[in-house]
Image (cartoon, rainbow, N blue to C red):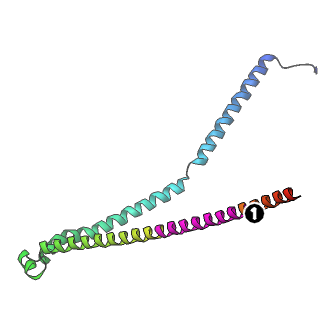
Amino acid sequence: MDRNYTVPTHQNDKLDHLITAIEKLMNRYEDVETQLANKCSISDALKLEERINQLEQRLASHENEVAPKLTELPDKIMTTALPHSVEKENGISDKDLIKFVVQEEINKKNQLRRKTLKAVSETSLSIAYLKRNQIMFRREKLAMQYSLETSLTEFLMWKWMTTTLIKCTG
């Protein structure tokens, strides 16, 4: 056979086309694999469904237990309720009860106001004390500055007078 023999170009085109088709299939396969990796497994889904069924059964059993009790409740309330006239004789009337509750709320508000006023007055006293101290500090500071300036002025005058006297006598 001749070593220089080459495959016709028509066969090369078919081979290239086949290779590109295989590459596309591989890409699709990889996409499907990544999508499957993000999905949950069937066993996990079955476990969750089983747990949901168990919870639904428990809820139904609790409802069955509570339903008769709820139907009996209005009957028990009616039998244990006292007549209105008996309540008035033995207990506090609604009007008195309302007055008591309103008075309690008024007392609470008044007590809160007193606490607030006390805190405000203490704060204003402390602010006044701070202002007074600040004014006194400023006054002392100004007095010290004045005495320093006076001393400096006196010293400068003494120096000027001595130098002048020395010049005049000298």
SS type, badge 1: helix
Q: In this view, does 46 lie to the left or right of 77?
A: right
Q: Which residue is drawn at the image coordinates 65% and 66% (left, top)? A: 144
| Nearest the eye: 98 or 4 | 98
Name, please, the residue furthest toward the bottom: 90
Binning the other alpha carbons within 10 Å of mark 1 as few (below 14), some (14 to 19) or many (20 upward) gives few
What is the x, y in percent for residue 118?
A: 38, 72
Q: Which residue is drawn at the image coordinates 45% and 60% (left, top)? A: 50
Q: Label 1 amino acid?
A: Phe
| Nearest the eye: 23 or 144 | 144
Q: Which residue is drawn at the image coordinates 42% and 71% (left, top)? A: 122
Q: In this view, does 125 lie above or below 29?
A: below
| Nearest the eye: 53 or 12 | 53
Query: What's the magenta bit mostly, secondary-structure-wise?
Result: helix
Residue 143 among those drawn in magenta: yes
Quadrant where the N terminus lies? top right
Q: Name the residue under label 1.
A: 155
What span is colored magenta in the figure?
Answer: 128-152
Q: In this view, does 39 lie above or below 63?
A: above
Residue 150 among those drawn in magenta: yes
What is the x, y in percent for residue 117?
A: 36, 69
Quadrant where the C terminus lies? bottom right
Q: In this view, does 32 lie to the left or right of 46?
A: right
Name, please, the residue furthest toward the front: 169
Q: Which residue is drawn at the image coordinates 33% and 72% (left, top)? A: 114
Q: Is residue 146 left or right of residue 60?
A: right
